[in-house]
Amino acid sequence: MNPLLVLLSALGGAGLMYMLDPDRGRRRRALLRDQVVKLTNRTQDRVDALAEDTRNRAEGLAAEARQHLASESVIDETLVARVRSAMGRVVSNAGAIEITANQGRVTLYGPVLEREVAPLLAAVRAVPGVTDLENRLQVHQQAGNEPSLQGTSPQ
């Protein structure tokens, strides 16, 4: 059965007269049809967006799972660059810290403020490719007389 007729019969006699009016009925039916088409398109767009979002999230989870399951062998220079990038987000003077890497084993040297040690070590351990971490940092309560720590913003 025609969906428009089903809708019209649901509206009852007054609705039929309103929609089948010889003067304005054609326009009203066209407006109703346009609204139904618009609603259908919006619903389809939202369903498509939800499906794409779900697919992207599933692909991301699969990529993360593959990364955790695969033992990644990283070139030492690449690992140092990754560590330096992660370190720059948690340490105020990242340039004061020297990083060495040897087959996944990372060693950190240099001065660092005490409040930055725990976030720094956590960030370095989370870097893909880091298998071991050796902490040879010189911990300072405050910047004091350490030139490489000068200019840090108090946090």
Image: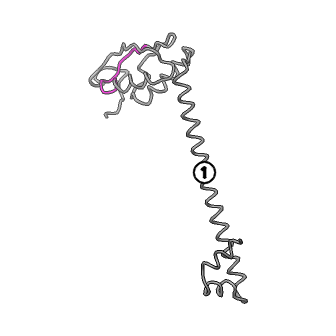
Q: Which residues are magenta?
A: 107-117
Residue drawn where x is 35% and y is 30% of the image: 152
- Mark 1 surroundings within 10 Å by alpha-carbon count, few (fewer than 14), some (14 through 19), many (20 or more): few
| Residue 98, position as x, y percentages in the image | 44, 16
* Residue nearest the viewer, comparing 83 with 2: 2
Left or right: 25 as drawn, with respect to 75: right
Residue that label 1 marks = 49
Residue most extreme to the left: 141
Residue 45, picture quadrant: bottom right
The type of residue carrying mark 1 is Ala
**Residue 101 on image: x %, y %:** 49, 13
36 is higher (above) or lower (below) than 88:
below
Asked if residue 141 lies left or right of residue 56, the reply is left
In the picture, the quarter occupied by the C terminus is top left
Q: Is residue 20 above or below residue 118?
A: below
User: Is 19 situated above or below 115?
Assistant: below
Place of residue 106 in the rendered image (x, y in percent of width and height, measured from the top left): 45, 14
Residue at 60 percent of width and 87 percent of height: 14
For the residue pair 134 and 88, the one nearer the viewer reads as 134
Quadrant location of residue 134? Answer: top left
Task: Say which of 104 and 108 sits in front.
Answer: 104
| Residue located 67% across and 83% down the image | 19
Mark count: 1
Q: Is residue 109 magenta?
A: yes
